[in-house]
Image: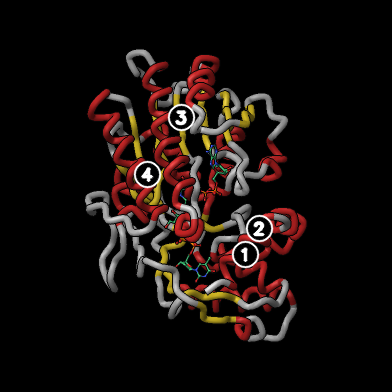
Amino acid sequence: MSTSNTILITGGAGFIGSHLVRLMVNKYPDYKIVNLDALTYAGNLENLKDIEDKPNYTFVKADITDADAMQELFAVHQFDGLIHLAAESHVDRSISNPMSFIETNIVGTVVLLNAARSHWGDFSGKRFYHVSTDEVYGTLGETGFFTEDTAYDPRSPYSASKASSDHLVRAYYHTYGLPVVISNCSNNYGPYQFPEKLLPLMINNIRHEKPLPVYGDGKYTRDWLWVEDHAEAIDLIYHKGVNGETYNIGGNNEWKNIDLVHQLCDVMDELLGRAAGSSRELITFVKDRPGHDRRYAIDASKLQNELGWGPKIQAEEGLRKTASWYLENTGWLERVTSGAYQEYYEKQYTED
Ligand code: NAD
Ligand code: DAU
């Protein structure tokens, strides 16, 4: 796959997408990188200010559910490959509004599959890369890991929509021979993550000395991966992965939510020059997320053994870098948390 040079990245104005777009625009000056994004509440072109004038970068504002627009885009650009990240990504929002997840994550993915299928001739040298989540595997108990062979068992509307899109991507491989590859990744963290997600939400609340809402007993476990490590894995799999295969991506970095929040509080106290322990006092246990998956943990040995990938940034360093970035970019935080986000926050955290 090293010859592909016009690549469509969907969702490139979002959290992970913006890191991937930046990596590929800077690393491959001879490629044409087309970033397609609908700029929903989660998409922000400010995330890409440093690369927006590069000659190998183009932005297209469009909705992946718009079949005519996607067919036209494929006709105009003659893409060699597509890396598909556009999605509704927040589990809590999927509980209050499942339909937008069905539309974007399932219908939007099929629209893109159809556009690729009808414009890619005999498919030679092409690649359709679907970026997915470990949440499709459901939940783990105290032990064990998700492997690529773990049976799907999604339990939220978000994870069910992503599982459905994974199945459809595989169906296009088996039925039509479309050259596809899928990766399923654990929780990402780092700069530009929308502050509805655990870490940036806690950072923002600590700044404002607001309560830190920990769901349930706080003993839910996630495997955290530095977002740039994920972007590097995607780049590697796009170029070196095998068609029809799935690759799990994870940080080998499990934390119970409450332990992670404690660690973050201590880092924030230090960075803000506050008394040790003061941010921990803001922690408030709130009603649990319905259907909350207890534990995710990824076995990423296939990716490590076959393609030589491993995470580079460890937890303590990553947490400090993340907290520092948000404190140095309070303007960004203020802009994305104004307006409609305030309404979402009130509804999510004050209604029974
Ligand atoms: P995000 O919510 O930050 O960004 C999603 C982007 O998609 C936004 O820029 C948004 O404007 C765009 N988008 C949404 N609907 C669209 C539509 N109909 N048409 C075009 N663009 C649209 O999400 P993220 O956290 O960056 O996640 C990116 C992808 O990675 C998603 O597919 C998600 O399922 C997957 N993923 C995320 C994580 C994580 O921890 N964040 C982990 C594993 C997998
Ligand atoms: O595992 C990969 C997934 O990680 C991605 O596919 C999703 O797109 C991404 O949003 C993320 O899903 P989570 O539900 O794990 O992330 P979130 O940041 O919403 O929550 C992380 C954990 O923290 C989870 O156990 C719920 C808990 N939590 C979350 C919020 C927002 C709280 O305790 N309080 C909160 O306010």
CB within 8 Å, label 3 to label 1: no
Instruction: State whether residue 168 is above or below residue 69.
Output: below
User: In x, y percent, where is residue 137?
Assistant: 30, 55
Amino acid marked by disc 1: Tyr
Tell which tag, 2 or 3, sits nearer the viewer.
Answer: 2
State yes or no: discs 2 and 3 in contact (Cβ < 8 Å).
no
- Residue 178 sits in quarter: top left
**Residue at the spot 68% in from the left edge and 36% down from the top edge:** 51
Res. 341 mark: 2
For marks 4 and 1, the one nearer the N-term is 4
Reading the image, the residue beneath label 1 is 345
| Residue 198 position by quadrant | bottom right
**Disc 3 secondary structure class:** strand
Amino acid type at mark 2? Tyr
- The alpha-carbon separation of the residues under discs 4 and 1 comes to 31 Å
- CA separation, marks 3 and 4? 14 Å
Residue at numbered disc 4 = 183
Q: Are marks 1 and 2 in contact (CB under 8 Å)?
A: yes
Work out whether mark 2 precedes mark 4 in sequence or the reverse, and give the earlier one: 4
Residue annotated with mark 3: 82
Residue drawn at 57 percent across, 28 percent down:
33
